[in-house]
Amino acid sequence: MATNSRGQFNSRLGFVLAAAGSAVGLGNIWKFPFEVGAGGGAAFVLIYLAFCFLLCFPVMISEIAIGRKTQLNAVGAFKKLGHHNWAWIGLLGILAGVFILSFYNVVAGWAFGYFLQMVQGNFEIGQNFGSYISKWESIGLYGLVFMGVTSVIVSKGIQGGIERAAKILMPSLFVLIIGLMLYAFTLDGAMDGIEYYLVPDFSEITGEVIYSALGQAFFSLSLGMGALITYGSYVSRKQDIVRSAAMITLTDVSVAFLAGMMIFPFVFSSGIEPNGGAGLIFATLPGVFEGLGPILGIVIGATFFLLLSFAALTSTVSLLEVPVAYLVDEKKIKRPVAVWGMATLIFLLGLPSLLGNGAVEQLTSFMTLYRDGQEQMISFMDFVELIASDTFLPLGGTVIAIFTAYVWKKNNLNAELMEGRETDSKWMMSYINFAVMFFCPIILGAITIITILERFFGIQVF
Ligand code: PFF
């Protein structure tokens, strides 16, 4: 894509796949299962699903519409539809994206490193996950490679890189997860896993479960930070935004849901604790692959972690695209300079997250925050995740809904959504209007404020 002319996705499938590529990533396959484990199982899943469809879907539609209307980056879009005073919403998003990418890249390094371990048939790595992630030199190197590949793709622009990669790799990952899920069902103890995952125990629902489910919904759908405003700016006016958003949401939620259906039978049949935290899939899966036998284990294990790395790559590409589009559009910086400059900065910002997994004690036990009223020691990486993903994204979603309904105004939103609309069903439009005007600002806003009070100040609202 030339720096002075905006690229455009070739087809609806191109946009949907690229946006779904952004949405589907480590969030679905690594983060979702351990958040379910930390949240007590099925009750978390239920709340997460409700948030995705009821609260996040209308925000997604608003983001894409704002992007397509303005043909601008996250900051420029708010300035154009509102006023200079609204640029801060975009800046908040860019900040969230920069911090998310800083730790996301570290976890992508874990996944890529696991691919290399699987190729060598090192199935014991699952039991040594803790010491594996504390080796900052090797993980740092993988992270560096990952950030480098991301930068090459982003500097080539929208059609050349993102679209082509997404078209091939996403469906392959989907098929592999389904295959592994069917295999998981055949193992001893599988049913306990399914029960844990699907039969809700409502006594497990605490404030913390609600906040993490909301943060997870935003993170997983790539919402609240302008990623979909930026991608929306490359969408043709002939496309049906509502339908595209529905396809993106359904794809993302299905992958997360199936990843859970795959992992919990494995977790229960291996006798691992489901609430083991960030290492859940990394501790569980190598043993499962080993059980497939030496040759098949290596083939399936290596393929799985390679595809997981690619899923992470289509997400890191979208995370980097947000600040880059801002620098290119607003600051008139040449795309390659913006890409490599930002990538370097973000990699450096990720160093404390890299070192905070055992290598440096002060970063591993970084600070105390509150969880359901109890003090809890967290690592630097947990801290960044809590601020950027669980707080900034829902906050961004709230202000995006308020902006859409009351600054840009609902009639303008509706006019934009009608362009390219393929059906004239009214109920969907009515729900979107209701959600953007009332439901999202009130419910989303309230949960976001309560999250901040409880997590950071220990003030128990419920
Ligand atoms: N949705 C991605 C995932 O679930 O892995 C993470 C992500 C990508 C979040 C892009 C935010 C974003 F803008």
Image: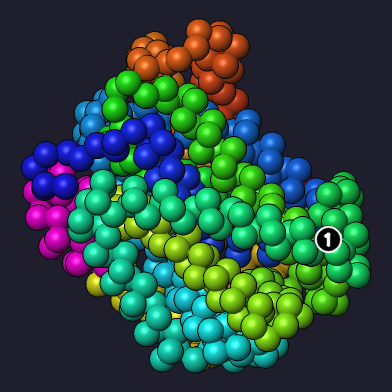
Residue 415 figure quarter: top left
Indicate yes or no: mark 1 CB to ligand 1 under 8 Å: no
Q: Looking at the image, which is closer to me, 461 or 261?
A: 261
Q: Looking at the image, which is closer to me, 77 or 67?
A: 67
Any part of residue 429 in sight: yes
Q: Does the magenta stretch include residue 31?
A: no
Instruction: Check disc 1 and report the residue beneath it.
Output: 185
Which residue does the image show at 59% across and 38% down from the upper left?
A: 250
Type of amino acid under label 1: Phe
Within 10 Å of disc 1 (Cα), the crowding (few <14, some 14-19, many 20+) is some
Residue 70 figure quarter: top left
Q: Is residue 337 magenta?
A: yes
Asked which secondary structure carries label 1, the reply is: helix
- Residue 349, position as x, y percentages in the image: 34, 73
Q: In this view, does 143 lie above or below 5?
A: below
Q: Is residue 450 above or below residue 369?
A: above
- Residue 218, position as x, y percentages in the image: 54, 46
Which residue does the image show at 50% across and 8% down from the upper left?
A: 424
What's drawn in magenta, residue-wise? 325-343
